[in-house]
Image (spheres, rainbow, N blue to C red):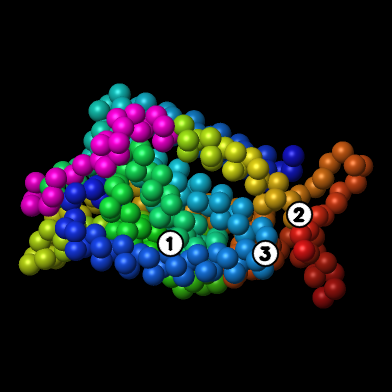
Amino acid sequence: MHIADGILSPAWVIFWWLVALVFIGIGVIQIRRKSINNPQYLPMLALMSAAVLVISVWHVPVPVTGSSSHPCGTPMAAIIVGPFPVAAVTSIVLFFQTFVGHGGLTTIGANDWSMGIVGAFSGYGVWLGLRGRTSIFWAAGLAGFVGDILTYLTAAFELAISIHPEAVLRYIGIFMLGYAPTQLPLAIMELVFTGLVVRYIAEVRPEMMKYAGWTPPPVKTTEATETTRGAG
Amino acid sequence: MDKFTKNALIACALLCAFIITSFYVGTALGFNMSGGADDKVNSLATADGGGQAHDSWYYVTQNMEYIGFGSIGMAGGFLCGYLWVMTFEETSNIQGQGKTEVTRHN
């Protein structure tokens, strides 16, 4: 989804920047508010940003297609620190990634919209909808999967609407044909990765899940079960 | 070092090993590891009527990758090292004092 400089028309470059800036602004306000209320929020956000930086620049070879691509990491970050802050820090992540030839300076807005905003919000939405109805692994994992796929679908949309506004759907299909065969196995990898990480944190360090306003249910231990049985 | 920190560090080490290994395997098999599907679609978009894809930093310096990797690595390392204790201290065990303490901010 790293759209390079020069491809999008100037009007769409400005449009995606403006849209992204709204989310970045709200994200910065939330970061300030949360870090005042909880001093541990900022270092946690920094760690999540580092994770997104590494994950979204980590090219994994996909033997079936003979190419490589990368996961996103933003759905996982949104589950842990909240989606608006992720939209803000992803813009910084994308800036650093331009140093290593990923994306472009003028397209940070468009790339933030696809990965930092659509990826984070769709993943967070799936997480909100599924947690409590299924296991933490599947709720978080499906959030990672959906966030990953929608990120690339959005990038295809951004390219299509800028280059061929008269045939958007057709060109979304064409650009997705470039992304999908390589991205689908990685989306499944992101499902497993996100599910395992969030489940592990929820079980071992449940207090780390409070930043996005969720407290995991207490893990039932054998001791507690025995006590309950004894009392009953 | 508590169990969570130890597991996190082990996971980081395993991930690093996997990233390096997959990069070398991908490069050896010619999987376009530097650009991948993103480059493929960027080229497709350029060929389909989009503007010519280019790297803005190329006009500043051609060694930006080295500078970028170096500065990101240093900043990330210092940041993680500096913030690690603050992030996880809430329930971490302070060892060497003969007892377990729970430290909190506020």
Name the side, left or right, on which A15 lies relative to A210.
left
| Residue A204 percent location from the top left of the image | 67, 54
* Residue A54 vs residue B27, the one in the foreground: A54
At x 70% / y 46%, what residue is drawn? Answer: B85
Magenta stretch encompasses residue B18 = no
* Residue B91: numbered disc: 2
Q: Residue furthest top?
A: B28
Write the start and end of the magenta stretch as one range.
Answer: B47-69
Residue B57 appears in which quarter of the rendering?
A: top left
* Residue A87: numbered disc: 1
Q: CA distance from mark 1 to mark 2?
A: 29 Å
Would you name the residue on which mark 3 appears? A38
Q: Residues within 10 Å of mark 2 (few under 14, many from 20)?
A: some
Depicted A186 relative to depicted A167: above or below: above
User: The residue tagged with tag 2: helix, strand or loop?
Assistant: helix
At x 48% / y 66%, what residue is drawn? Answer: A27
